[in-house]
Amino acid sequence: MAKNQRPSGERPPLVADAIPPALRRRGVTPRQVFAAILVGALVLAVFASRDTPGWAERLGDTPLAHQARGLAIAWDERMARLGLAGPHEFLRAAMQRLLDWKWGDDNR
Amino acid sequence: MLFPTLDFLLFFLVVAAALAALDRHFAARKAMLVGASYFFYAQWDWRFCFLLAASTTISYVAGLMIGATANARRRRLIIASGVALHLTILGIFKYLDFLVQSANGLAHLLGLQHELPFIEILLPVGISFFTFHGISYITDVYRGDVAVCRAPLDMALYMSFFPQLVAGPIVRAAYFLPQLARPSAEPIPIAAAFLLILGGMVKKVIIANYLATGLVDPVFAAPDNYGGPDLLLATYAYAVQIYCDFSAYTDMAIAIAALCGFRFPRNFNQPYRSQRLREFWQRWHISLSTWLRDYLYKPLGGNRRGRLNTYRNLMITMLLGGIWHGAAWKFVMWGALHGGGLAVERICEPWIGRRSTGRFGQVVATLVVFHFVCLAWIFFRAEDFTVAGVFIAGLGSGWSQGLQQAQPALVGLIVIGMAGQFLPPGSFERAGRALAWVPHWGLGAAAGLALAAINALGPEGIAPFIYFRF
């Protein structure tokens, strides 16, 4: 018997799984999980490049952090030149306009 | 290290790479996850890791000792000692200064001059959660609900697993330890996991953050500056904020655990659609409410020893549930309101029944429960009783002032947050099933795009999750 197997008479816990069984029938392997996260991270790095300098700024004052800061700024500039920072800026500006909208304002 | 940050993404990328590399080596995967969990915890303060290790050792040794004897008296002594040790650690780190403050307050009232000194210990993040994990394990072994865990690695992973370490859900030993016995044969439900992460990001980064900074924080900081409409909307906003904040954390924890190959229990189920307070507690922070039910309410006697004892047990359970949230009298008040509410509901049950019948009755019952929960949230959120008093008194005045703080976008976020409570049951399952056919790289790319959009729509910087301080 495996070490943590339930002893006879042991009650199963009365809690429901957060992800229903129907959704656990189809899925992927750990390698595919890693691949999917890697693809997601790359897409995020491309379209959220505007936030990378700010993130690098918070890394501290070590030589590695300075290097990361330089890389982040260069990366952001490259993405901006390619026009890939546009969607980020558009969404941020749109959200700001929504937040600035006050009751009684006619010119949104 | 917060879930919705680039730091966490990089950390998890490394963990996912290691899990992929160690796919066929289950023991090595578990060891790697323990190491990653301690690294994750050390990001707050490396000294906390010793506390976590001590809590793990207490649970492990107590479990072995209970399993080694059949003598009922000895077993009782071991469980009592194990639980007492856990509670002592929690008490010292979380409640000692609160007790000192309360004792000093009482001494002041009695006209005594002497004041006890404060200890001023830093509260270790997540201590309430891993203490409850440890107590649950020892109790389950004692009751025979779970086998003794003889593998130190398994116990270390159960106590420290990083998705649930700092803010839950509280995962029972009987639920999690069997998953560590052998590798799961199930595939990893990546579509459902990504859906939970994206939903959690929307709830935390957009809804909870904007409601906190735009409405809740300013209004609760100075309620006397606002009229009734702003105060009422700030109350609704806090109800939505705390739900979105906490459920977002647990959704992401569930998803991250799933991506590591483990199952977690459900922790929220549209709580604001409840028609009874009892139902609210079956839908809100389910892992805590079931923990309190099984390890406190039932051992106290539950509803088995007559009506008065049932009301007393409800009250004790909710008072302790309140103080679990924090060392302050306002949390005791919050617990007392819920305990009192549950007792009154029981008294009225012969007339109102367990569920309302008819559409009108259901709407009224839902509104009554929601507003009662909101009233209790005012005490939970306010700095102290004085602020809560000013806030509640202000609700009835200043209705001619109109809205100063609750601007249209914030009201829209309250509406969106509440609308999520009334989505038809099974919506998540349907969405997950529809996405299950998308290839994994497509899901990754879509998730990356969606995260970039959420990041752009949210404010700069992420506030810590509310439940981190508990």
Image: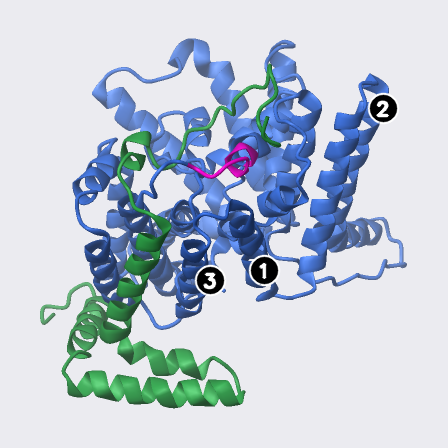
Query: Which is more N-terminal, label 3 or label 2?
Result: 3
Distance from Cα at disc 1 to Cα at disc 3: 11 Å
Give the SS element for disc 1.
Answer: helix
Residue at x-position 19% and y-position 51%: B439
How far across and how far down the image is residue B379, in percent?
53, 46
Same chain, marks 1 and 3? yes
The residue closer to the viewer here, B246 or B40, is B40
Distance from Cα at disc 2 to Cα at disc 3: 43 Å
Q: Say which chain tag 3 marks.
A: B
The answer to whether mark 2 and mark 3 are in CB contact below 8 A is no
Tell me the amino acid under the disc marked 2.
Arg
Question: Residue B74: which disc?
Answer: 2
Residue furthest out toward the front: B24
Q: Say which chain tag 2 marks.
A: B
Q: Colour of chain B?
A: blue
Residue receiving disc 1: B41
How far across and how far down the image is residue B348, in percent?
46, 15
Question: Residue B176: which disc?
Answer: none
The answer to whether mark 1 and mark 2 are in CB contact below 8 A is no
Tell me the amino acid under the disc marked 3.
Leu
Q: In this picture, which residue range is highlighted in magenta? A: B177-184
Tell me the amino acid under the disc marked 1.
Tyr
Query: Which is more N-terminal, label 2 or label 1?
Result: 1
Is label 2 or label 3 in front? Answer: 2
Residue receiving disc 3: B2
